[in-house]
Image (cartoon, helix red, strand yellow):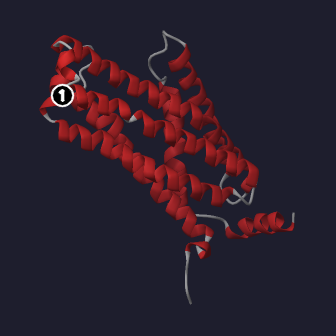
Amino acid sequence: MKTNIREMSPSAYARFAGVLYLVITVAAIFAHMVIPEQFIVVGDAAATAANIAADETAFRLGTVGSELIILLSEIVLAVVLYVLLKPVSKTLSLIAAVSRLAMTTIHGLNLLNYYLVFQLLNGGSIATAFSPDQINALVTLFLDAHSIGFTIGIAFLVPHVLILGTLIVQSGYFPKVLGFLFIAAGIGYLFDATGLLLVASYTTTPGVIAAVIAAAEIAFPIWLLVKGVNMDRWQNHTLALESA
């Protein structure tokens, strides 16, 4: 009997989504925590530029390489989550998928800021137009622009997270507590992104927001991997959707 992706069970989709979440999480730790902490010296543009120039390959692999893994995984995850939650509401699931893909697009374009850093540090024709101090300042400027670009992308993720939480609560084939966690995380994302983008004095994510977001982003993939989907309730939603 021939098997194709259309014949994958909901549990298989759930576990696939769990794997994608874990891949994204691990890659994000490298891209946004491990590598920046090794290369970026807060308040010292010259040291930051020197660190990146000294081992550009490691910086490229750790940031751009990791983010490419994240972006490709995000595209697939958006589709898989749409498939998993479509039986609850096809329209809301589609909106959630578009929201996640919008974030992915913004984060992809945001990688251009890193390439501007590399152009400045590689000593090409562009770099000759600036003094060393100006190059160091521009490197910091583009790194800061990358951070802001990331936050802009997260702002576009907010509808996805809020809708995802709502659909999980309504589904019956995932625990309601996971849905409420995502709704709380969505509110946290909204508060954090709004603060970082619109309030000059807001520079650090409050610990409680980070904790709620982490709880949702860790608990859901673990559930997907270990438990998957309640098949009886999945089938009830599917039959209702088909008869509508």
Which of the two residues, 237 or 172, is positioned nearer the viewer here?
Answer: 237
Which quadrant of the figure has residue 119? top left
Residue 198 versus residue 164 in the image, above or below = above
* Residue under the image location 15 percent in, 36 percent down: 55
Where residue 93 sits: x, y (%)?
Answer: 69, 51
- Residue 138 shows in the view: yes
Where residue 3 sits: x, y (%)?
Answer: 55, 81
Count how many numbered circles sit on residues in the image. 1
* Residue under the image location 37 percent in, 43 percent down: 67
**SS at mark 1?**
loop
Which quadrant of the figure has residue 199? top right
The residue tagged 1 is: 124
Image quadrant where one finds the C terminus: bottom right
Kind of residue indicated by mark 1 = Gly
Where residue 184 sits: x, y (%)?
Answer: 63, 35
Residue 4 versus residue 139 in the image, above or below = below
Furthest residue toward front: 125
- Residue 178 shows in the view: no
Where residue 53 sits: x, y (%)?
Answer: 16, 29
* Residue under the image location 45 percent in, 31 percent down: 150
Q: Is residue 187 left or right of residue 170?
A: left
* Residue under the image location 53 percent in, 33 percent down: 154
